[in-house]
Amino acid sequence: MASGLEIDARLVLSFNNEDIQIAGSGGYLIINFPNQRVFDTLTSGPPGGGPEKPKPPKGFDPLQQLNDLARQLELVLELRVAGKTHVTFGAGRSPKITFHAVLGKIGSFFRGS
């Protein structure tokens, strides 16, 4: 049985006329979003005022679960926005969130919808 996931890929996805780049080599995968607006749109969930989401169980941390999965697969997943690393999964015991991610999220509060 293989000990880890090996990747060799390059893919460009279009979303609302914006290109999202995905590249991988060996055990390293990078997903680059063109700007904070696209990143926020894709990570905010479905649009609209639908029914309220149920509360996750206490102690449930989706970022930690993604990090644990990346470590199990021996994969490092790096999320970038405009070429700047925001979050790295699988490189340590917990996800590494950068200062760029914090500034990007703060900036998105001041932008109009």
Image: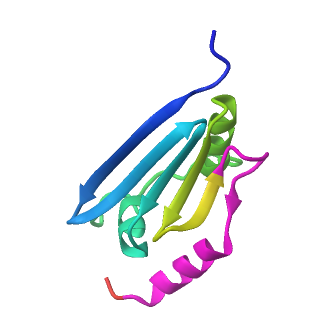
Vertical arrangement, residue 28 with respect to residue 86, above or below: above
Residue occupying the far top of the picture: 1
Q: Which quadrant of the view contains residue 42? A: bottom left
Q: Check residue 93 for magenta coloring.
A: yes
Viewer-closest of 6 and 54: 6
Q: Check residue 32 for magenta coloring.
A: no
Residue occupying the far left of the picture: 17
Q: Position of residue 84 (x, y in %)?
A: 55, 69
Q: State the count of labels.
A: 0
Vertical arrangement, residue 44 with respect to residue 12, above or below: below
Is 63 left or right of 29, judged from the image as shown?
right
Q: Residue at x 68, y 30 (%)?
A: 72
Q: Which quadrant of the view contains residue 1? A: top right
Is 40 left or right of 89, judged from the image as shown?
left
Image quarter in which the C terminus is found: bottom left
Viewer-closest of 49 and 91: 91
Q: Residue at x 59, y 65 (%)?
A: 86
Q: Residue at x 39, y 44 (%)?
A: 10
Q: Position of residue 75 (x, y in %)?
A: 62, 37
Is 99 left or right of 78, judged from the image as shown?
right
Q: Which quadrant of the view contains residue 66? A: top right
Viewer-closest of 59 and 22: 22
Q: Position of residue 110 (x, y in %)?
A: 45, 90
Residue occupying the far right of the picture: 93
Color theme of the render: rainbow
Q: Residue at x 67, y 69 (%)?
A: 98
Residue range of the region highlighted in magenta in the rendering: 89-111
Is 105 left or right of 57, judged from the image as shown?
left
